[in-house]
Image (cartoon, rainbow, N blue to C red):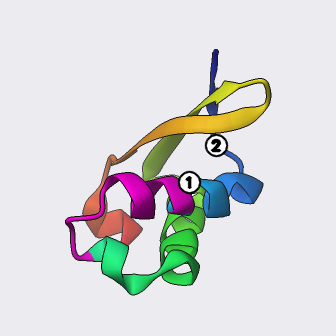
Amino acid sequence: MNVLIAEKKDAKDIAKIHEREINQGFLSQLGIKFLSKIYEALILSPDSLVLVAKENNVIIGFVSCCLNSQGFY
């Protein structure tokens, strides 16, 4: 397993994992397209960090954080 900084192209796979694994929250109900946009923004923002765990070049997990939520919004 490798842990890497997420790239923009990873956003949809991250969104799918979010929807499947964090299915009790509000964000999961907004759909893959919306979640993909959120993760794309987090990946591109200098105020946040998104890491992915990859096994055989497939994303199997992720973690994200916003270092400055006011700056991100």
Could you classify mark 2 by the number of other residues whose Cα lies within 10 Å: few (under 14), some (14-19), or many (20 or more)? many
Q: Mark 2 points at which residue?
A: 6
SS label for mark 2: loop
**Residue 54 rendering spot, x and y as whole percentages:** 66, 28
The front one of 70 and 57 is: 57
Q: Quadrant of the C terminus?
A: bottom left
Examine the rendered structure and indicate whether residue 70 appears above or below residue 17. Answer: below
Expressed as whole percent of the image width and height from the top left, the position of residue 34 reads: 50, 82
Q: Is mark 1 on a helix, strand or loop?
A: helix
- Quarter residue 68 falls in: bottom left
Mark 2 or mark 1, earlier in chain = 2
Q: Which residue range is magenta in the image?
A: 16-26
Residue 54 included in the magenta stretch of the image? no
Q: Which mark is residue 14?
A: 1
Whether the residues at callouts 2 and 1 have beta carbons within 8 Å, the answer is: yes
Q: Where is residue 72 in the image (x, y as percent from the top left)?
A: 39, 66
* Quadrant location of the N terminus in the rendered image: top right
> Which amino acid type is shown beneath numbered disc 1?
Ile
Q: Which residue is drawn at 57% across and 35% down?
A: 60
Q: Does the magenta stretch include residue 17?
A: yes
Q: What residue type is labelled 2?
A: Ala
Which residue occupies the foreground of this view, 14 or 67?
14
The mark lying in front, picked from 2 and 1, is: 1
